[in-house]
């Protein structure tokens, strides 16, 4: 009986020790970079690693004691919680590991941790469930506009071909790098700098996520609803009416046209301005061009107020920009008529 009691007590004590044992995240010591700093920050957002010790070492015997190892060790093996990218055999990108995703930039430790744990991290920070569509949209957005840059910089991948016109020295990766000791500093201890980098990266990641969650995502939902109801605005399906003025729409529109398989490209977006008047804006041919899919009528361009109303036959006109990319009217109906009138003059593709 005493032996049984001792055995049960031993089991319970062992379990208590395991529960109290602090989890360990392993990464390399010495000069630190943005990728392993971001990887460590992301892991610490998860309940199991919330209070984890970050062990910085290249000693294999010490790293073996860690629950997860990032950016050191020469091995990528998720089953062993090893996430290094420096080994010669490593060529993975988001696309190679998740073929449904488009990004082909070679992953760093930041991208690896984000790929495997990112949905859980975002769920913790936003309280969205992992299977909610909004979370998947945020997951893609945060990789494309935050993590991928860190992957590329750490792997020495240039943003573009050719010689750059000027230097950018304030990227997140650069600012993390500046927190390392100066080459000629008498104190070469990197621990304090690493802690500062962890805080810096954490604030930036959370701020960016907060913006996408509270401003970018609501705008996307407004644009998505407008795309889905566009035939109620005009039978052509080429006019979009935004319920809330000031909503950023271009990026969302291009993405949603692909996702929703919009056959006929949308030509104009209508929205109210700060004065309660209405704007009709041409949809550009792409995000980074000033060319329009269809510009407002040439004879209206640069004309204003009564002269424009008389010329167009549309009441309450305010202006049409000299380039024809945007116009204004005091009423929604007037702005809508300006768009419709322009559509009527547009060449139509021949039926197949």
Image (cartoon, grey):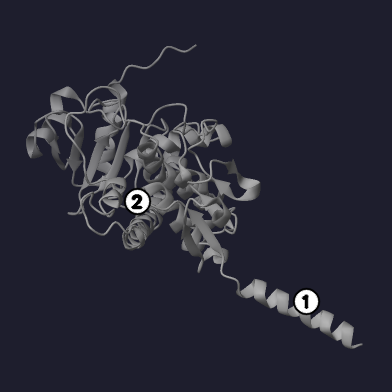
Give whichever of 337, 184 is nearer the camera. 184
The quarter of the displayed image where residue 223 is located? top left
Give whichever of 338, 34 is nearer the camera. 34
Residue 157 marker: none
State whether residue 95 is above or below residue 187: above
User: What residue did someone put label 1 on?
Assistant: 11
Give whichever of 240, 194 is nearer the camera. 194
Left or right position of 98 against 17: left
x then y, percent, for residue 104 = 47, 31
Residue 98 in view of the camera: no
Say which element carries label 1: helix
Q: Residue at x 23, y 49 (%)?
A: 183
User: What residue did someone put label 2 on?
Assistant: 243
Residue 145 in view of the camera: yes
Q: Residue at x 36, y 33 (%)?
A: 156
x then y, percent, for residue 38 = 41, 52
């Amino acid at each position: 009986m005493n032996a049984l009691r001792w055995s049960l007590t031993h089991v319970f004590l062992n379990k208590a020790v395991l529960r109290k044992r602090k989890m360990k995240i392993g990464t390399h010591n010495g000069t630190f970079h943005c990728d392993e700093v971001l990887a460590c920050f992301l892991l610490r957002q998860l309940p199991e690693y919330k209070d984890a010790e970050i062990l910085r070492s290249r000693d294999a015997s010490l790293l073996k004691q860690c629950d997860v190892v990032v950016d050191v060790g020469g091995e990528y093996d998720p089953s062993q919680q090893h996430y290094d990218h420096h080994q010669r055999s490593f060529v993975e990108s988001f696309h190679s590991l998740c073929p449904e995703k488009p990004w082909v930039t070679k992953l760093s430790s930041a991208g690896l941790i984000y790929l495997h744990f990112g949905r859980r991290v975002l769920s913790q920070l936003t309280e969205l469930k992992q299977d909610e569509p909004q979370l998947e949209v945020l997951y893609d957005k945060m990789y494309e506009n935050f993590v991928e840059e860190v992957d590329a910089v750490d792997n020495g991948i240039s943003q573009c071909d050719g010689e750059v016109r000027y230097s950018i020295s304030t990227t997140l990766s650069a600012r993390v790098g500046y927190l390392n000791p100066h080459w000629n500093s008498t104190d070469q201890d990197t621990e304090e700098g690493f802690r500062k980098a962890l805080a810096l990266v954490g604030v930036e990641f959370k701020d960016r996520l907060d913006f996408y969650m509270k401003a970018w995502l609501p705008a996307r939902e407004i644009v998505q609803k407008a795309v889905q109801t566009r035939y109620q605005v005009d039978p052509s399906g080429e006019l979009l009416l935004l319920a809330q003025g000031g909503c950023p729409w271009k990026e969302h529109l291009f993405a949603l046209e692909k996702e929703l398989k919009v056959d006929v490209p949308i030509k104009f977006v209508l929205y109210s301005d700060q004065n309660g008047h209405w704007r009709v804006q041409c949809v550009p041919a792409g995000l980074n061009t000033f060319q329009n899919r269809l510009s407002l009528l040439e004879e209206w361009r640069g004309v204003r107020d009564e002269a424009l109303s008389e010329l167009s036959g549309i009441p309450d006109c305010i202006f049409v920009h000299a380039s024809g990319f945007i116009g204004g009217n005091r009423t929604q109906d007037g702005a809508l008529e300006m768009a419709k009138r322009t559509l009527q003059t547009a060449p139509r593709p021949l039926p197949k």
